[in-house]
Image (tube, grey):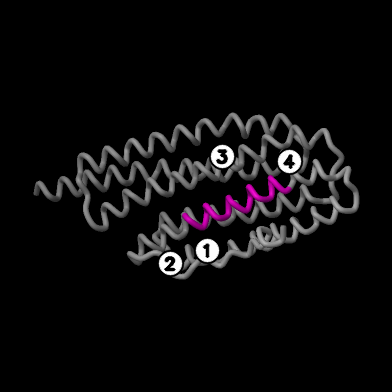
Amino acid sequence: MQDQHIASAFDRDLEAIQAQIMKMGGLVENAIKEAAISLETRDEERAEKVRHADKAIDALEEHINEEAARVIALRAPIAVDLRLVLSVIKVSANLERIGDYAKNLAKRTGVLSQMAPVDDSAATLRRMAKEVERMLKDALDAYVNRDAELAQDVIDRDTDVDQMYNALFRELLTFMMEDPRNITACMHLHFIAKNIERMGDHVTSIAEQVVYLVTGTTPDEERNKADKTSVQA
């Protein structure tokens, strides 16, 4: 009976923490969307709201970590249960980093709004961000439902984000070579594109956590990264 009580208490604790994870995930999804829209529409007020909202994301990560530590100390979970608690910490850390990248994107809105637009690069960045946002939603759904197949699909889709990044990188290089006056704006746009590409990497890390939870092993193949810009420079 005592063991059943402890198990029940652990389940309640874990359910409460995972509810906080989903709340945090919703805030991060919204941050990605709002930051990308603010960039495309040059809406500095919207961008400022994204920057301010990041404080709530950071606070949730801190709360989740505290609760996870409390569960480990009080319940002493082992095996699968311990894996569940540790996954919560890793997922929240990845969500916090994605939120930081969204905040960084919003920070550039004010600077770029003072410069002439560079072709349709802002729309391209929004398409990239929208794909990452969809990936994050699916990764969190996979986490809640312990759906390794959906998680693997998210991992595979990261290549699409990398390919969009590579294409935009080449376009920005062309704009800079054609007209040096574009250099400053293009550098800011490249910084944003790289941030979105890194968001995709962190979403992929969340999906990999799901695969680990379900199967007990991490994907053993090296992730197929399509970002080749490091060898193009």
> Mark 3 or 4 closer to N-term?
4
> Mark 3 or 1 closer to N-term?
3
Residue sitting at x 50%, y 41%: 96
The residue beneath circle 3 is 100
Label 1 neighbour load within 10 Å: few <14, some 14-19, many 20+: many
Q: Quadrant of the C terminus?
A: bottom right
Residue sitting at x 27%, y 37%: 70
Secondary structure of the residue carrying tag 1 is: helix
* Above or below, comparing residue 59 to residue 89 in the picture: above
Position in image of residue 223 (x %, y %): 52, 65
Residue sitting at x 38%, y 34%: 63
Give the residue type at disc 3.
Answer: Asp
* Above or below, comparing residue 68 to residue 222 in the picture: above
The residue beneath circle 2 is 219
The residue beneath circle 4 is 39
CA distance separating discs 2 and 1: 10 Å
The residue beneath circle 1 is 155
Label 2 neighbour load within 10 Å: few <14, some 14-19, many 20+: some
Give the residue type at disc 1.
Answer: Ile
> Mark 2 or 4 closer to N-term?
4
